[in-house]
Amino acid sequence: MHGHLTPPKPGEELNVTFVDKEGEEHNFQVAHGDNLLDIAQSEELEMEGACGGSCACSTCHVIVESDEMYEKMDEPDDDENDMLDLAFGLTETSRLGCQVKMNKALNGLRVKLPSMTRNLQASDFSGAKKS
């Protein structure tokens, strides 16, 4: 089960803020190397992560609020880009939470959770295509 992150060492805390669908801010102090999906799930935020963080769905889609922070991240790889193409409400600064690991450069990161997610792997998925 998710939800057991190693707390950051004193003096090494990194700050990250999640803005949920209602616009509420959730601030956390996390450790270097923690990814956004694990952080959100350990804090019981509404982030599904249907594939368990293996970059095989788009349910941990986050929107990085600042272009400056987005530029500090490693480029998304092809797998992540393919999954992002399926994400609901894709933006220029969208990323998959499972692929964003916290580091010193990202201290103070703010991400928004999209208003909906789309999980194409779900067996109960009912597509919009109706004939």
Image: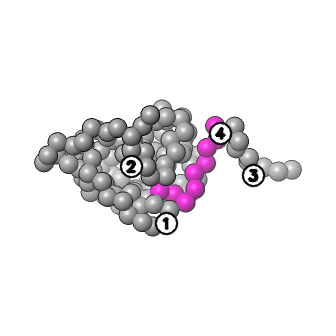
**Residue furthest to the right:** 131
In terms of secondary structure, where does tag 3 sit? Answer: loop
Residue labelled with disc 3 = 128
Residue labelled with disc 4 = 122
Residue 62 visible at all: no
Q: Position of residue 70 (x, y in %)?
A: 35, 53
Q: Which mark is residue 98?
A: none
Mark 4 neighbour density, 10 Å: few (under 14) some (14–19) many (20 or more): few
What residue lies at 44% left-to-right and 34% top-to-bottom? 1
Check contact, mark 3 vs mark 4: CB within 8 A.
Answer: no
Q: Amino acid at mark 2?
A: Glu
Please tell me which residue lies in front, 13 or 102.
13
Q: Is residue 116 magenta?
A: yes
Q: Position of residue 125 (x, y in %)?
A: 70, 44
Check contact, mark 3 vs mark 2: CB within 8 A.
Answer: no
Which span is picked out in magenta? 113-121
Between disc 3 and disc 4, the foreground one is: 4
Q: Position of residue 19 (x, y in %)?
A: 41, 61
In terms of secondary structure, where does tag 2 sit? Answer: loop
Q: Earlier in the sequence, mark 1 or mark 2?
A: 1
Q: Amino acid at mark 3?
A: Ala
Residue at mark 3 to residue at mark 1: CA–CA distance = 25 Å
Q: Position of residue 56 (x, y in %)?
A: 54, 34
Magenta span dominant secondary structure? loop
Image height of 57 relative to 16, above or below: above
Q: Earlier in the sequence, mark 3 or mark 1?
A: 1
Residue labelled with disc 1 = 22
Q: Earlier in the sequence, mark 3 or mark 4?
A: 4
Please tell me which residue lies in front, 40 or 83.
40
Residue labelled with disc 2 = 43
